[in-house]
Image (spheres, grey):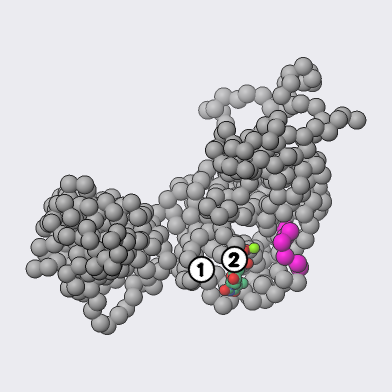
Amino acid sequence: MAKQKSAWFCQECGVESAKWLGKCPSCGSWNTFVEELVGGGSTSSSAHRPKATGGSVAPRLLSEIDTGSEVRRTMHDGELNRVLGGGLVSGSVVLLGGEPGIGKSTLLLQLALRTSGLKTLYISGEESEQQIRMRAVRTGTGDGECHILTETLTGNILHHAEKIKPELIIVDSIQTLQSELIASVVGSVGQIRQCASELQHFAKTHHIPVVLIGHITKDGNIAGPKVLEHMVDVVLLFEGDRNYGFRLLRALKNRFGSTGELGIYEMKSDGLAEVSNPSAMLLSHREEDYSGTAVAATLEGARPLLIEVQSLVSSAVYGTPQRSGTGFDLRRLNMLLAVLEKRSGFRLGAKDVFLNITGGIRLDDPATDLAVVSAIISSNADIPLEKGCCFAAEVGLTGEVRPVTRIDERINEAARLGFHRIYISKYNNKGLRKNPAIETVPLASVGELAEHLLG
Ligand code: TYD
Ligand code: MG
């Protein structure tokens, strides 16, 4: 029998070393090396390589390959279909990451139960059959055919999968699986990589989509080796603020579609509900006027979304003023404050500035800038902005108001929700198809914006 050898692997990036190292030379993380057993015989040595026979596949001319083989299955979940780019592709492997308790298991169980006629094999290494049944009762069962298997050995799982012949396999979670083919501990880099590659091989040879649930580490990355993300076809991230009901589903990688789409759900007492009209839910419908709030007409993927931005500017109590932003990049907030100070003469250097995007949503769209600046101007002067106004433009370092993409869609969504005025960049104004229901105000600079808002 071949002698068992061991090697040290970085748990962050999967790099291999012959001895323990304090700092990973590849990804730079500290104290992440763990010893794992590796199978006998080195795979990298060419001396022991068996004689090549040419294999079962031969090179083919690209133009001769048939493209019609990509089969998509539409699921009973409009938001997931949107994020995937139109349904699950057969033979694809999808990795779904997210914090504990965010609702990954609920999302996939619902999918399995509600997609009519879908035969699913749901593998759980985390919960018992009874727990899953209780969750299913809570979320309401549908007419999908869902088989539950509480097993963690990949050999047994694939054996059952061969017998049941499911149309979808869900693995909850990849970190709990174990392969008999290698000897390292459950949850280690080697095990995760091995189990994922066995499942991937099964998916590709049987043309069945496989969805893997993955844990994430404290800094928001999917736990396990980075190679896991490279191996799979689609990486989805399920996120949201625990204190709010909203959950967002994003694609970080998608071999079959765009990564710009966003799925929005709301966690209710009977499971996750799709939010198909998010703008209307994200705006607070208050009667009183407060200073410091402004509405941004943003885009998330293909969808326009109107979101409220709140800001509070007050005199700093301590020497160093505080700046904090929830749902908005702090460096960008500091940049906008510097622009306001330098280009329009607002004295904000000695003020605390707090910024909050409602609904626990994180905004990356540069078109949010103008609403952020307006909310800060309004709070600083303690003058509420006129009701029914919204904003869509980027702010540049010179204080200029810059154009943003797909302005027509933003304007139409604002008009649809009853807004009567939208502030945009004057560069967006050219060639704009006017919507009679809403007035557009073109702006050149932040100074001009302040004149409009403060009168
Ligand atoms: P879960 O799917 O177990 O999360 P994950 O698999 O990502 O760890 O979701 C657990 C949370 O969701 C739990 O805190 C309770 C909440 N929840 C509801 O609010 N409503 C429901 O119908 C269900 C099933 C869960
Ligand atoms: Mg779970």
Mark linked to residue 242: 1
Asked if residue 28 is positioned above or below residue 274 in the image, the reply reads above
For disc 2, the marked residue is 101
Q: In which quarter of the image is the C terminus?
A: bottom left
The three-letter code of the residue at mark 1 reads Arg
Q: Is mark 2 on a helix, strand or loop?
A: loop
Q: Position of residue 255 (x, y in %)?
A: 52, 43
Residue 6: percent from left, percent from top: 77, 34
Q: Is residue 237 left or right of residue 15?
A: left
Question: Is 249 or 366 nearer to us in this picture?
Answer: 366
- Residues in magenta, as a range: 123-129
Between the residue at mark 1 and the residue at mark 2, the CA separation in whole angstroms equals 9 Å
Quadrant assignment for ligand 1: bottom right
Give the label on residue 352, or none: none
Q: Does the residue labelled 2 lie within 8 Å of ligand 1?
A: yes
Tag 2 or tag 1, which sits nearer the N-term?
A: 2
Labelled pair 1, 2 in contact (Cβ < 8 Å): yes
Residue 126 highlighted magenta (yes or no): yes
- Which of these two is toward me, 221 or 312? 312
Q: Which residue reaches farthest right?
A: 1
Question: Looking at the image, which residue sits at the far bottom?
Answer: 287
* Residue 410 found in image quarter: bottom left
Q: How crowded is mark 2: few (under 14 residues within 10 Å), some or many (20 or more)?
A: few
Considering depth in this image, is 299 or 146 the residue closer to the camera?
A: 299
Left or right: where 414 falls relative to 89: left
Q: Residue sitting at 52 percent across and 28 percent down?
A: 63
Whether residue 32 appears in this view of the structure is yes
Number of disc labels:
2
Q: Residue at x 17, y 46 (%)?
A: 398
